[in-house]
Image: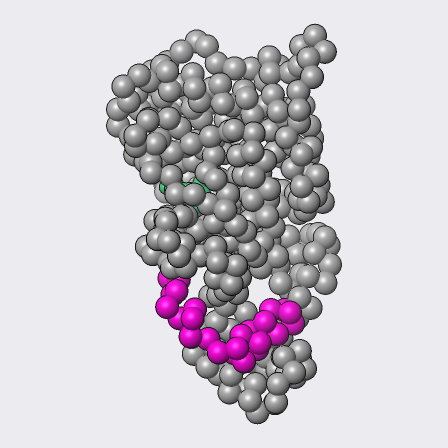
Amino acid sequence: MKLDATDLRYVTPEEFRVLSAVEIGSKNHEIVPTVIIVQVSKLRNGGVNKLLGSLAKRNLVARVQNAKYDGYRLTYGGYDFLAMRAFLKRDSLYSVGNQIGVGKEADIYLVADNEGKEMVLKLHRLGRISFRAIKEKRDYLGKRQSASWMYMSRLAAQKEWAFMKVLYDHDFPVPRPIDQARHCILMSHIDAYPLRQIAEVPNAGKLYSTLMDLIVRFARVGLIHGDFNEFNILIQRDSGDPIVIDFPQMVSTSHQNAEWYMTSNPVNRYFNRDVECIRTFFKRRFKYESSLYPKFQSTKDRDGEEHFRLDVEVAASGFSKKEQKVLEDVGDMKISLFRGLTVVLSIWKRSKLLSQTKVTKT
Ligand code: ADP
Ligand code: MG
């Protein structure tokens, strides 16, 4: 979705009040009844309808007519707008430039502050499909169920923000966190290419061990990245040193909730997966193989050696265990959806094979 920054400055204070009223109303209503928008915005009835019309024209809200009543819901565009406005008001953001990344669950833009300094804006977008599934099964969201896509996207941003801050403060090679609002994060722009785009490196062995050391360094402070792959490792253009991004799936090494993992020690699996990603990529891309790679066991404290725990620090920073759990459940649901699809596909394939066999027999 395109972000329109010029539009940001041309929303009147009254339109903004109506937009905020829709956001507030959507905490309890999937479709916010117009009467509630009128009540919350404390503006005249007729006036509100007109303002809603102009917001809907710019796709900041969407009109929904259902059997019981007419109302509006906030769109992603509207939610983006509210976050951008918060950044603008705090002077952390001034202009929005090109989109530089489209992920499954985030849009990335190049933006600038009022001195023209480049930054990266990440807008988290957790889709709606997984929430339908989660809604049927879980009741964590309570009354918030109706606003779950907004809530979940915000949680993902809060989690990423909490991790990025703690990691940056402890000199891990991550972007500098600048600001966070709703589902958005502002961070420093890294002048780099994702490892994925790199055909050759001067010393594959050196980069390999730097990355493995990093996985170990994470684990020694209680963290596993969980998605440590060639897309989330940026290689800086000048130094060739790696910077790691993308933290919404980070787990604590004391994490035990991973029902879908087959082994008795899920943490091991998370850790091994990160290690395996790097090994596979280096073999394929740089034809580099090493018999040396870290094992989770070896990252544990030896001889009563005490380490500070960043997972504990993150939890203390305000991003609670409960919030982490909500996010993890979305991940789990997606995996079960994927598994469900795989089962359906394999049944379909088998039935196709059977019917083909019948044809050849006759
Ligand atoms: P997603 O959740 O969609 O994978 P990422 O945080 O991994 O989002 O970002 C997607 C892409 O955007 C990255 O692969 C990278 O190319 C670019 N990107 C993200 N953050 C930065 C940054 N701070 N500096 C430069 N490029 C970035
Ligand atoms: Mg990524």
Question: Is the image coloured rainbow, by chain, by secondary structure, or in one colour?
Answer: one colour
How many tags in the picture?
Answer: 0
Considering depth in this image, is 347 or 209 the residue closer to the camera?
A: 209
Where in the figure is residue 185, as x and y percent of width and height?
Answer: 50, 50
Considering depth in this image, is 134 or 161 the residue closer to the camera?
A: 161
Using residue 38 as the reference point, say whether residue 276 is left or right of it: left
Q: Quadrant for the N terminus, please.
A: bottom left
User: Residue 195: in sight, yes or no?
Assistant: no
Vertical placement of residue 145 versus 282, above or below: below
Which residue is drawn at the image coordinates 72% and 52% (left, top)?
Answer: 140
Q: Residue furthest front?
A: 115
Considering depth in this image, is 177 or 226 the residue closer to the camera?
A: 177
Where in the figure is residue 222, as x and y percent of width and height?
Answer: 63, 26
Which residue is drawn at the image coordinates 37% and 26% (left, top)?
Answer: 241
Residue 15 shown in magenta:
yes
Residue 161 shown in magenta:
no
Which residue is drawn at the image coordinates 33% and 26% (left, top)?
Answer: 240
Magenta region: which residues?
1-26
**Does the magenta stretch mainly form a helix, a strand or a loop?**
helix
Where in the figure is residue 121, as x and y percent of width and height?
Answer: 44, 51
User: Residue 175: in sight, yes or no?
Assistant: yes
Q: Quadrant of residue 154?
A: bottom right
Which residue is drawn at the image coordinates 50% and 26% (left, top)?
Answer: 274
Q: Quadrant for the C terminus, please.
A: top left
Q: Quadrant of residue 269?
A: top right
Where in the figure is residue 207, as x and y percent of width and height?
Answer: 37, 20
